[in-house]
Image (cartoon, grey):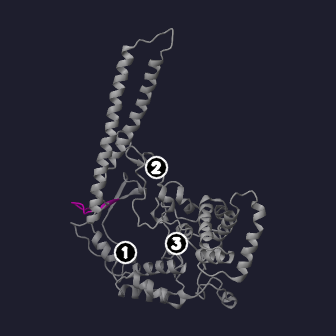
């Protein structure tokens, strides 16, 4: 059970009270319906059907009874769902030491029922720099393994950590194969630099903040992405970092950026991502046959405008709803692991940007903001470029955008809101540009 602030505890108590009142109200509705159902059954029993003519009263009672049966069934499901999801203090999963720790058998071919030789607990010998730490008989060994991993003498931990942070900032690691540091992986392009950064990282108390500051203030990080023909001829892959690598934004950053520039991003700080409050998203709550389950069939209305990191991740199926953009722009499926996401350039990405409702709707929001912000065309264009590309518009871009805006009205002659639709097309095009989608 996780600790709560006084404010959180008070809010939970209020929620619990409202939840109890809701359950009581639902049960009251069900009781009244069941009482009425008994009355109808008695009336139907006392009234004899007439075979030679229709009885409108009996037909009405039978229809009402059917409606009550359906409504009681619905209320049963709603009450079961409400009782299952009573507001409780937040909890999280944790681990603890077994009462009698022991070595385990090898599972032959991964089959837990095919037990092989017993293997004593230990650490990876090939990555050890001296004798392995002893494993106490009365402990699992998790503490000893953690100390071994975080030991300053460990040749891997600091280098792997530094390499991954470097990759996040520069686009590629000093060792490009961030998931493979052994003989199957790539050799470091700057081995001395990797060793120096790893040593500084350990000396600074494993502080990621200090490491990121050191890298972000370096000349290599502050370089632009401009092309240099002489440097490209000598180092076409930019292994020596003569310029910053051009990188497309991750799927999450693309969606969040679209929401931000359109003014629709909700300023929230998280919360439960799974919309379990909807009955259609849950199943097996009674536990009679199947265990409780979750199926993402309905999102909260506000999730359309929340940051992507707060959206639920579907493990076994394509990402749906507001998170569909993940599926198009190389989101790593949660059943796999990857230190660095792949970056593909395929037609489906361009088709998505052209046709998906997310881009169209947010382009319309952006256009409304721009039209409201200024009355003159040039001022609107200046506002649009600052909002979307975060820079002033150039004179040649003003001319190109003006020509685009002048060319569209005849093509949209049937529109009831011609001015807005023309600017929507311009905003949509700008949201699909490389400059918006990439770190240039």
Where is mark 3, residue-wise?
A: 340
Left or right, 25 with respect to 211, comes to: left
Q: Nearer the viewer, residue 211 or 353?
A: 353
Where is mark 2, residue-wise?
A: 295
Kindly report which numbered mark, 1 or 3, lies closer to the viewer in this rendering: 3
Q: Provide residue 196's location: percent of width, then percent of height.
A: 44, 89
Where is mark 1, residue-wise?
A: 125
Graded by Cα atoms within 10 Å as few (under 14), some (14 to 19) or many (20 or more), the crowding at tag 2 reads: few
Are the residues at dot 3 and dot 2 in contact (C-beta closer than 8 Å)?
A: no
Q: Residue at x 45, y 68 (%)?
A: 267
Disc marking residue 93: none
Task: Please provide the residue range marked out in magenta.
Answer: 96-105
- Tell me how far mark 3 sits from mark 2, CA to CA: 29 Å
Mark 2 and mark 1 lie on one chain; the one further toward the N terminus is 1
Graded by Cα atoms within 10 Å as few (under 14), some (14 to 19) or many (20 or more), the crowding at tag 1 reads: few
Kindly report which numbered mark, 3 or 2, lies closer to the viewer in this rendering: 2
- Secondary element at image label 1: helix
Mark 3 and mark 2 lie on one chain; the one further toward the N terminus is 2
Q: Is residue 3 visible?
A: no
Q: Provide residue 124's location: percent of width, then percent of height.
A: 37, 73
């Amino acid at each position: 059970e996780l600790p709560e602030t006084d404010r959180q505890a008070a809010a939970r108590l209020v929620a619990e009270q409202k939840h109890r009142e809701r359950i009581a109200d639902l049960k009251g509705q069900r009781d009244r319906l069941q009482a009425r159902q008994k009355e109808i059954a008695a009336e139907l029993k006392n009234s004899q059907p007439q075979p030679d003519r229709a009885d409108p009263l009996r037909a009405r009672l039978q229809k009402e009874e059917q409606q009550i049966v359906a409504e009681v069934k619905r209320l049963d499901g709603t009450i079961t769902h409400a009782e299952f999801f009573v507001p409780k203090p937040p909890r999280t999963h944790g681990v603890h030491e077994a009462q009698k720790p022991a070595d385990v058998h090898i599972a032959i071919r991964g089959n837990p029922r095919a037990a092989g030789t017993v293997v004593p607990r230990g650490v990876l010998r090939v990555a050890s720099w001296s004798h392995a730490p002893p494993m106490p008989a009365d402990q699992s060994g998790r503490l000893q393994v953690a100390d071994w991993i975080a030991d300053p003498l460990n040749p891997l931990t600091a280098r792997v950590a530094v390499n991954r942070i470097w990759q996040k900032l520069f686009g590629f690691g000093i060792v490009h194969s961030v998931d493979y540091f052994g003989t199957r992986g790539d050799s470091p392009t700057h081995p001395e630099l990797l060793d120096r950064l790893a040593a500084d990282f350990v000396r600074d108390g494993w502080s990621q903040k200090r490491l990121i500051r050191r890298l972000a203030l370096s000349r290599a990080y502050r370089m632009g992405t401009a092309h240099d023909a002489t440097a490209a001829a000598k180092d076409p892959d930019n292994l020596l970092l003569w310029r910053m690598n051009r990188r497309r934004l991750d799927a999450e950053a693309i969606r969040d950026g679209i929401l931000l520039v359109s003014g629709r991003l909700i300023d929230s700080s998280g919360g439960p991502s799974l919309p379990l409050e909807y009955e259609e998203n849950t199943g097996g709550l009674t536990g009679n046959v199947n265990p409780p389950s979750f199926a993402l069939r309905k999102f909260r209305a506000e999730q359309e405008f929340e940051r992507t990191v707060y959206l639920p991740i579907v493990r076994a199926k394509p990402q749906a709803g507001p998170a569909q953009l993940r599926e198009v722009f190389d989101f790593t499926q949660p059943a796999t692991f990857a230190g660095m996401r792949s970056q593909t350039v395929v037609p489906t990405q361009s088709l998505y940007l052209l046709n998906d409702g997310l881009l169209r709707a947010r382009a319309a929001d952006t256009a409304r903001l721009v039209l409201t912000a200024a009355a003159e065309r040039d001022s609107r264009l200046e506002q649009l470029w600052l909002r979307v590309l975060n820079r002033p518009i150039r004179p040649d871009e003003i001319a190109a955008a003006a020509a685009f805006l002048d060319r569209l009205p005849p093509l949209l002659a049937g529109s009831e809101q011609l001015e807005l639709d023309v600017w929507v097309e311009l905003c949509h095009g700008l949201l699909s540009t490389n400059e918006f989608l990439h770190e240039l």
